[in-house]
Image: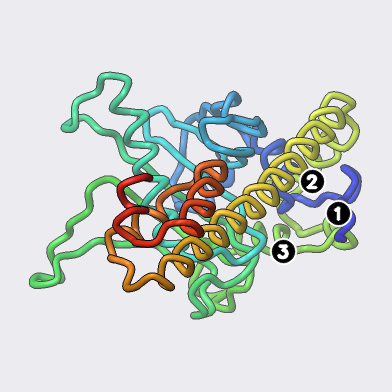
Amino acid sequence: MKQKKSLQELTFKDNFMFGAVMLDPENCKGILERTLGIEIERVEVSKEKSIVYNPEYKGVRLDVYAKDEHSSHYDVEMQVLRKPAVKKRARYYHGQLDMEILLSGLPYAELPDTYVIFICDYDPFGKGKYRYTQRKICKEEPELSMEDGAHTVFLSTKGTNVNEVPPALVRFLKFVEAPLSDSDKDFEDDFVRQLQSSVRKVKESREMGARYMTFEEFLNEEKEEAREEGRVEGRVEERCQVIIESLEELGSVPEELQVKIRQEKDLAVLKKWCRLAAKVEKIAQFEQEI
């Protein structure tokens, strides 16, 4: 079993530390400016959506939600491990941002720009780029921009195109990539020093220490719930198969009936159906009694 890290062993790219450091608007602003290559006057970080357990999201949310002086909305996520369908995840996050904005009563025509940013400690597309910026164009007219205000950017710590991106972005990504032993070294960058200082403050904070313990408890609960759900799903699938195999001894089981059996998730109901399938003499009788 993988031993959990203590708060002192965390680096900036660990999810809890990333969320804690990004609670500081100046840290968040600096990362957004380096990622997008723009200047931002001010940033408001949504603290209630950072490092919290929210049943609505079925888990611990570690994305950083923020908006700037132009009401542009940002969702920033740290990804240490490769996750499947990363482009579809970005699409989902854009939808979530739009839904929250629209629920506030804003009409479609006034939707602000939204930015979904993934900071990846791996190369998500294998092309050796430090930054991948999504652009929407018309297939028939490539010069025709189809931008709708939804922007997606993938950063990679494994980039090799040093001469194609700003040095400040490269220094930041080198800091993100650094293991614990190198995380406090001098990256010759004032903003990185600011992030290093924030990391140290989090590690020295008794409040953050308590929040980290709570965070770990929630993660453990989630894992246990997932294991239990997996065990239940296994028993459900097994009982459905037993029922169908029992009925197959009586003849061909209609596709519609198989679908109905497999759609049932209540173990008590399936147990009852198992007994019924074992005693009926015709499939039609089983269909009538369930």
Residue on which disc 1 sits: 184
Amino acid under disc 1: Asp
Upstream in the sequence, badge 3 or badge 1? Answer: 3
Name the kind of residue labelled 3 in the image: Glu
For marks 2 and 1, the one nearer the N-term is 1
Q: Is label 2 in a helix, a strand or a loop?
A: helix
In the rendering, which numbered label is found on residue 103?
Answer: none
Q: Please report contact status of discs 2 and 1: CB closer than 8 Å, yes or no.
A: yes
Q: Residue at x 60, y 66 (%)?
A: 82
The residue drawn where x is 32% and y is 40% is 113
Categorize mark 3 by other alpha carbons within 10 Å: few (<14), some (14-19), many (20+). many
Query: Quarter holding the C terminus?
Result: top left
User: Which residue extends farthest top?
Assistant: 105
Look at mark 2 in the image and give the residue it sits on: 196
How far apart marks 3 and 1 lie (CA) works out to 12 Å
Q: Nearer the viewer, residue 236 or 150?
A: 236
| Residue at (67, 39) in percent of width and height | 19
